[in-house]
Image (spheres, helix red, strand yellow):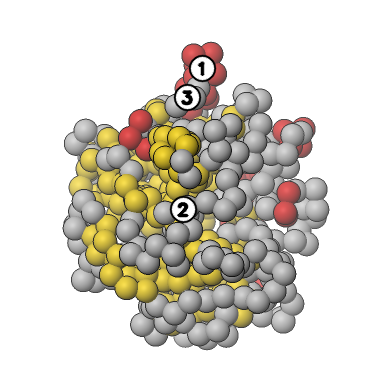
Amino acid sequence: MNHASPKSRRSFVKDSLIAGITLSGMAPLSLFANKDRSFPVQEALNYSLDLQVPTRLFDGEKCWVHPRAGVVPEAVKEGMPRMVMTMNTLDLSGSDVFKGMFGMHSDDGGANWTAPEALPSLAPRFEQVEGEDRPVAASDFWPTWHKDSKTLLGTGHTIVYTKDWKVAHPRPRHTAFAVYEPDRNLWSDWEKLDMGDNEKFQNAGAGCVQRWDEPDGNILLPIYFTPPGSNSQVTVTRCAFDGKALRFLEQGNDLSIDDDSRGLHEPSLTHFQGKYFLTIRNDNQGFVTHSDDGLHYAPIQPWKFDDGTDLGNYNTQQHWVMHSEALYLVYTRRGAGNDHVFRHRAPLFMARVDPEKLEVIRHTERILVPERGARLGNFGVTAVSPDETWVTVSEWMQPEGVEKQGSDGSVYVAKIRWTRPNASFSR
């Protein structure tokens, strides 16, 4: 639906074949090594960074957004798993207008990628909403390997538009999910998660959230939802997945905030050293909380640096990078000479987290992806192997004119290469 024209299609297919470009020279080398010495139990965990651009798209009408990669270890070629990336196109003439989802894959660890191809099974479709046919898109998608079923499961949410492709408010919203079939290199048709309580969860979804899969195969899936007459709230659900269908089982406590903001959004979950950690978006500041069982969470607290100052993240998502020896947060923030960037959503930072105090350790902060005028707030994290974790993000080419500062719609793969294997990694 509204896929790229032949002319623009040729241009971005050409641009997609630029794998292997290393951009680490775009920032000082000191940014690419973690020198944290705050945990004296053993030698600090270090990493190097290789920044690559497998594709780009900016033709004045569209750009790529929400690039996230999933691993398919079963589709092994010469000892390398398949990396599958999905992306939405963003219509630059509107706000959050996603008229198509595209995919590409790599069988050599990201050295080379196929050209982006439209994914008809994940495309928008028309549904009856409030008595009229309206376009409904699956977006904010995140493919993640499900070990128990040996399946790549992608989750996101739906967006209902008006007939002229404006985001409708209020609107029904659902968690969307689909399954990748590596033998045919196809995604199943996206489906909606049935939450049961239609009134409470009539506007609920898992857009841009980082999930955690339990050893028994059940999935802890954070969602955010807007009950009638309230602002947005967050909860963690437990879902069953059999390799084909996602089924809601139960939810934990509701997390909310009573202020002048739109509420809590885009929660992301991880598990580290026996505890669960949830990071949450809010208009005014990012929040964090923790849990012993993965469902029930302590009151939220604002993200801060270990010197007591505010982290400076607001109105955009944060996600986790987890290594068996250290927990990291990836985020954007104020105060980085970036007042010209929309909501200060670039550059993209990563820093180590103190899991006891729930603070970001300031001196460990490094730039993963540099700022070139465009925002970098919608990104994903992928554990690729015991030795490597990826952060994927694209230059969101709004508002008009960001290209004048160097951005060109690049999709970045920031490859974090650990000096010691991640013992928690398993496939």
Q: Which residue is mark 2?
A: 173
Q: Nearer the viewer, residue 355 or 7?
A: 7
How many residues crowd around disc 2 within 10 Å: few (fewer than 14), some, or many (20 or more)? Answer: many
Q: Secondary structure at mark 2?
A: loop
> 54 above or below 286?
above
- Between marks 2 and 3, how big is the CA–CA gap? 23 Å
**Quarter assignment of residue 251:** bottom left
Three-letter code for the amino acid on which mark 3 is drawn: His
> 307 above or below 169?
below
How many residues crowd around disc 1 within 10 Å: few (fewer than 14), some, or many (20 or more)? Answer: few
Task: Please state, as top left, top right, bottom left or bottom right, where the C terminus lies in the image.
Answer: bottom left
Three-letter code for the amino acid on which mark 2 is drawn: Arg
In the displayed structure, does residue 401 sit left or right of residue 328? right
Q: Which residue is mark 3?
A: 3
Q: What is the tally of numbered marks visible in this picture?
A: 3
Q: Which residue is mark 1?
A: 5
Residue 50 seen in render: no
The dot on residue 418 is: none
In the displayed structure, does residue 382 sit left or right of residue 50? left
CB within 8 Å, label 3 to label 1: no
- Residue 38 in the image: state x and y as whole percent: 58, 81
**Quarter assignment of residue 163:** top right
Three-letter code for the amino acid on which mark 1 is drawn: Ser
How many residues crowd around disc 3 within 10 Å: few (fewer than 14), some, or many (20 or more)? Answer: some
- Residue 2 in the image: state x and y as whole percent: 49, 25
> Residue sitting at 40 percent across and 55 percent down?
175
Q: Secondary structure at mark 1?
A: loop
